[in-house]
């Protein structure tokens, strides 16, 4: 998956099921097992905005002057 797709997933802008359906995330093996794993990642999803901010990464697209 691309970095943009990963950022969209981690920031909650795109769900994993949608990303898989659109082909942005490729699952090799049992898709059901992957989807069962996602709820376990909730604490990481909640912390992602803090991590991004601490790293100084822009979270919103900026206009180019």
Image (cartoon, rainbow, N blue to C red):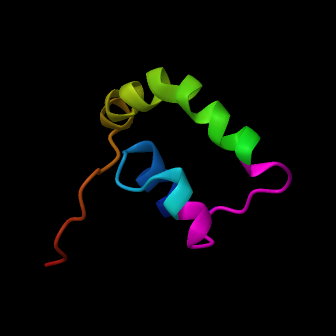
* Residue 34 in picture, x, y percent from top left: 70, 42
Residue displayed at 72% across by 45% down? 32
Task: Point out the residue furthest to the front here.
Answer: 32
Task: Point out the residue furthest to the bottom here.
Answer: 65
Quadrant in which the N terminus appears: bottom right
Regarding residue 2, the answer to whether it shows in the image is no
In this picture, residue 28 sits left or right of residue 18: right
Regarding residue 54, the answer to whether it shows in the image is yes
* Residue 43 in picture, x, y percent from top left: 46, 21
Quadrant in which the C terminus appears: bottom left
Residue displayed at 37% across by 27% down? 46
* Residue 10 in picture, x, y percent from top left: 45, 43
Q: How many marks?
A: 0
* Residue 35 in picture, x, y percent from top left: 64, 42
First to last magenta residue range: 19-31
Q: Main secondary structure of the magenta part?
A: loop
Residue displayed at 75% across by 39% down? 33
Location of residue 23 with respect to 35 vertically, above or below: below
In this picture, residue 1 sits left or right of residue 14: right
54 within the magenta span:
no
Location of residue 11 with respect to 4 vertically, above or below: above
Front one among 1 and 36 = 36
Front one among 43 and 48 = 43
22 within the magenta span:
yes
In this picture, residue 35 sits left or right of residue 3: right
């Amino acid at each position: 998956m691309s970095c943009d797709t990963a950022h969209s997933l981690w920031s909650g802008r795109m769900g994993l099921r949608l990303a898989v359906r659109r082909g942005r995330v490729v699952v090799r093996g049992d898709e059901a097992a992957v989807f069962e794993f996602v709820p376990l990642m909730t604490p990481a999803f909640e912390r992602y905005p803090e991590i991004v901010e601490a790293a100084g990464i822009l979270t919103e697209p900026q206009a180019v002057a």
